[in-house]
Amino acid sequence: MKRDLDCVFCKIVAGELGCIPVYEDANTLGFMDINPIAPGHTLIIPKHHAETLYDMPDDLLAHVVATTKRVASALRKALNPDGVSLIQANGKGAAQSVLHFHMHIVPRTLGDDLKINWPVVAGDMDEIREVAARVIQALD
Ligand code: DGP
């Protein structure tokens, strides 16, 4: 499994940096986004370091998508949002800020009018922890 020593998500995978996890298996990790654009905003990453979609082995990509479906289903069950968006950025022009492939799962509310280049705002950690606990409870 490839690791980049300077990568913040590789540090999370290695346990060197904390996160609020909601899902983990041998190849993927799901944890709460530290700058949530909506309550329940979650990231799914491969443990293997790959910068973008183009660097992802097909079988690992399929695994990340399967994990994304599983966690999105739990989010839907736990939070009953009006919808869920999956967002995945590749490169500066797409506003990718962490160069380790990741899928955003964003619960949506009718009329929330979210923009694809959202502002970075620190989340309320207690609120994020509380939502994570509800998602874990709803995992099948
Ligand atoms: P993107 O702009 O698509 O590369 O999204 C990166 C996301 O990663 C952004 O929404 C904030 C989140 N993020 C950055 N650093 C950390 C961190 O150390 N912990 C967690 N949980 N999320 C982070």
Image (spheres, rainbow, N blue to C red):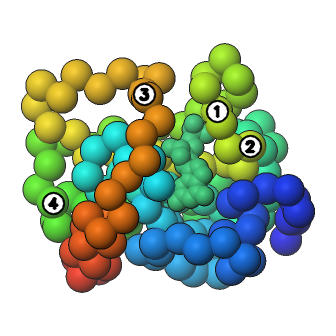
Q: Are marks 3 and 4 in contact (CB under 8 Å)?
A: no
Identify the disc placed on residue 79: 4
Q: Secondary structure at mark 4?
A: helix
Name which residue type carries label 1.
Gln
Separation of residues labelled 2 and 1 (CA atoms): 7 Å
Give the residue number, with chain letter if any, for mark 1. Answer: 96
Q: Residues within 10 Å of mark 2 (few under 14, many from 20)?
A: some
Mark whose residue sits in front, 3 or 2? 3
Separation of residues labelled 3 and 1 (CA atoms): 11 Å
Q: Residues within 10 Å of mark 1 (few under 14, many from 20)?
A: some
Q: Is residue 48 visible?
A: yes
Badge 2 residue CB within 8 Å of ligand 1? yes
Q: Nearer the viewer, residue 72 or 112?
A: 112
Q: Nearer the viewer, residue 40 or 123?
A: 123
Residue 118 at x, y = what percent?
42, 27
Give the residue number, with chain letter if any, for mark 2. Answer: 99
Q: Residue at x 66, y 17 (%)?
A: 93
Give the residue number, with chain letter if any, for mark 3. Answer: 118
Q: Secondary structure at mark 3?
A: loop
Mark whose residue sits in front, 3 or 4? 3
Name which residue type carries label 2.
Leu
Badge 1 residue CB within 8 Å of ligand 1? yes
Q: Earlier in the sequence, mark 4 or mark 1?
A: 4
In the rendered image, the vertical position of residue 6 relative to residue 86, given as above or below:
below
Q: Secondary structure at mark 2?
A: loop
Name which residue type carries label 3.
Trp
Residue 3 at x, y = what percent?
86, 65
